[in-house]
């Protein structure tokens, strides 16, 4: 098998259909296939099968061509976040030990190993109907280095089977067809992009790369969704909250938007309620799963069950995953074909055979037989002898009338061990004291944040998730 085979089959059915759109540039399935074949042909001449090929390209048509070309050649793609500091980029390159790094133009100054650089514009090979290299299902397809964890980044190694299992499940579950227009904003080093890249193109859909600059202007973003007649979008809750609050959805109808999928962090319920009310005809889905499992749970939002005082469920098993809860810790454990193959370290796979992957997330089952998420086990605080989950505090703060968003971390306390502290974004001109006054009635004394910092927006990682390390540093400064 090869994850790109379904795309090649689609090319024979709809060669002149639009495949990718970036700003004012659009390419058909036939044109996309031609570009892929040139890259694949070059890599095959370099014994490309099983090689690790890094990408130093912005999200867009060139990067998508490179990814498909790498996979077509039977190699492994490793997308770099080129907005990262040079030290982190070179650490990843040193650890991953790629055979090549595909970029555009001359090698950048930050790159320590310039000899590995390949200019994508120079990869011109004569091709004659190249077909995807047949690989074993267990063969690696992608290495995604995780962001924001403590210590050094790790490369999560994903097989063709893992990518294919999710891509097929998603296209079938959400009934993706050739008439769809998919908005793509997730960077390619973030696992949300697997849906954008593979579920869509295997079904003949068109992928529209959402300009990154629009994520800072919610009203312009919603206008873009309307203008492009986008039918499906997979993104993070923090951006959807921003759009619900400031995206002018009340005056910008989105009649073509069939569905929104979201994942990566908890969606504050009051913001989801607002979004659901503003988009009454759009299906909403909460998808859950760490990079190591991709999506293993999902919940179609039931508008009748949304309650501002409760977090939303992560739902039931997705992708035919078998889920269980550790009786002692409440940790969710996942047995799925989506599961990663292990970590890529020092240029090779450190296989873990993770048939059952412990997620590190605490969950429980509700009365509907759905999983409820209660936060990271490793974020749990010990305050005056009490076990305190920051996600519970965040939920209470996010309910407050004058709070737009918040994040809670633990800081050291000489008397109680740890105390919760909160970073908040105020929604109105209200003072901080006025905004947080109701917390006295909502939280037990040991759960009251001992310190608040007001910011314009929560620090975020390049994939849109809240950057808890940056928040921790605010309190350590």
Image (cartoon, helix red, strand yellow):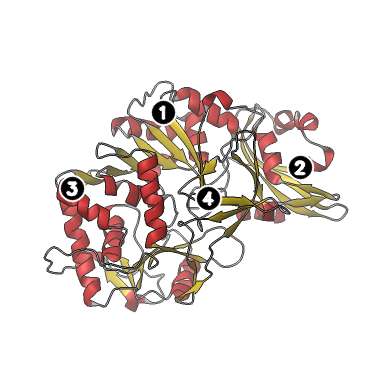
Q: Is residue 131 found left or right of 166 in the rendered image?
A: left
Residue picked out by circle 4: 289
Assign a secondary structure to mark 4. Answer: loop
- Label ID, residue 28: 3
Residue 282's mark? 1
| Disc 1 to disc 3, C-alpha distance | 28 Å
Q: Measured from the top left, where is residue 290 in percent x and y? A: 53, 53
Q: Earlier in the sequence, mark 1 or mark 4?
A: 1
Q: Looking at the picture, how far across and down is residue 141, in whole percent?
A: 37, 64
User: Quick one: label 2 or label 1, which is nearer the N terminus?
Assistant: 1
Give whichever of discs 1 and 3 has the lower sequence position.
3
Cβ–Cβ below 8 Å for labels 1 and 3? no
Whole-angstrom CA distance, mark 1 to mark 4, is 23 Å
Q: Secondary structure at mark 2?
A: loop
Q: Spatial distance from mark 2 to mark 4, Cα to Cα? A: 29 Å
Q: In terms of depth relative to the viewer, which is nearer, 338 or 433?
A: 338
Comparing labels 2 and 4, the label whose residue is closer to the camera: 4
């Amino acid at each position: 098998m090869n994850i790109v085979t379904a795309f090649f089959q689609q090319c024979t059915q709809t060669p002149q259909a639009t495949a990718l759109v970036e700003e004012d540039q659009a390419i058909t399935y036939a044109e996309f296939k031609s570009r892929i074949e040139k890259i694949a042909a070059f890599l095959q001449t370099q014994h490309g099968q099983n090689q690790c090929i890094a990408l130093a390209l912005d999200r867009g048509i060139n990067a998508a061509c490179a990814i498909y070309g790498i996979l077509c050649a039977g190699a492994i793609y490793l997308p770099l976040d080129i907005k990262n500091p040079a030290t982190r980029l070179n650490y990843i390159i040193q650890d991953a030990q790629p055979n090549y790094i595909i970029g555009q133009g001359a090698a950048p100054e930050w790159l320590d190993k310039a000899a590995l650089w390949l200019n994508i514009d120079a990869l011109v090979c004569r091709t004659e109907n190249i077909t995807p290299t047949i690989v074993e299902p267990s063969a690696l397809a992608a290495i995604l280095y995780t962001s924001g964890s403590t210590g050094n980044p790790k490369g999560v190694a994903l097989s063709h089977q893992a990518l294919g299992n999710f891509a097929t499940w998603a296209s079938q579950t959400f009934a993706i067809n050739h008439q769809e227009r998919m908005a793509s904003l997730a960077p390619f080093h973030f696992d949300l992009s697997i849906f954008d890249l593979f579920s869509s193109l295997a079904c003949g859909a068109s992928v529209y790369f959402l300009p990154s600059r629009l994520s800072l202007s919610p009203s312009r973003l919603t206008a873009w969704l309307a203008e492009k007649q986008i039918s499906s979008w997979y993104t993070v809750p923090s951006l959807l909250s921003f759009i619900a609050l400031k995206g002018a959805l009340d005056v910008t109808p989105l009649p073509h938007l069939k569905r929104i999928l979201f994942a990566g962090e908890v969606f504050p319920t009051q913001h989801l309620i607002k979004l659901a009310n503003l988009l009454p005809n759009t299906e909403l889905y909460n998808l859950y799963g760490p990079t190591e499992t991709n999506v293993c749970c999902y919940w179609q939002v039931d508008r009748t069950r949304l309650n501002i005082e409760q977090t939303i469920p992560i739902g039931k098993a997705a992708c035919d995953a078998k889920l269980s809860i550790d009786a002692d810790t409440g940790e969710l454990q996942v047995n799925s074909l989506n599961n990663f193959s292990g970590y890529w370290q020092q240029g090779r796979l450190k296989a873990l055979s993770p048939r059952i992957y412990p997620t590190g997330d605490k969950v429980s089952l509700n009365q509907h037989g759905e999983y409820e998420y209660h936060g990271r086990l490793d974020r749990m605080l010990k305050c005056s002898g009490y076990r305190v989950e920051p996600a519970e505090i965040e939920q209470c703060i996010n309910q407050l009338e004058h709070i737009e968003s918040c994040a809670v971390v633990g800081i050291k306390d000489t008397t109680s061990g740890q105390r919760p502290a909160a970073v908040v974004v105020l929604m109105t001109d209200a003072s901080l004291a006025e905004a947080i006054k109701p917390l006295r009635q909502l939280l037990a004394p040991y759960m009251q944040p001992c310190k608040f910092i007001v910011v314009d927006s929560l620090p975020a990682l390049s994939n849109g998730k809240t950057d808890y390390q940056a928040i921790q540093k605010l309190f350590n400064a």
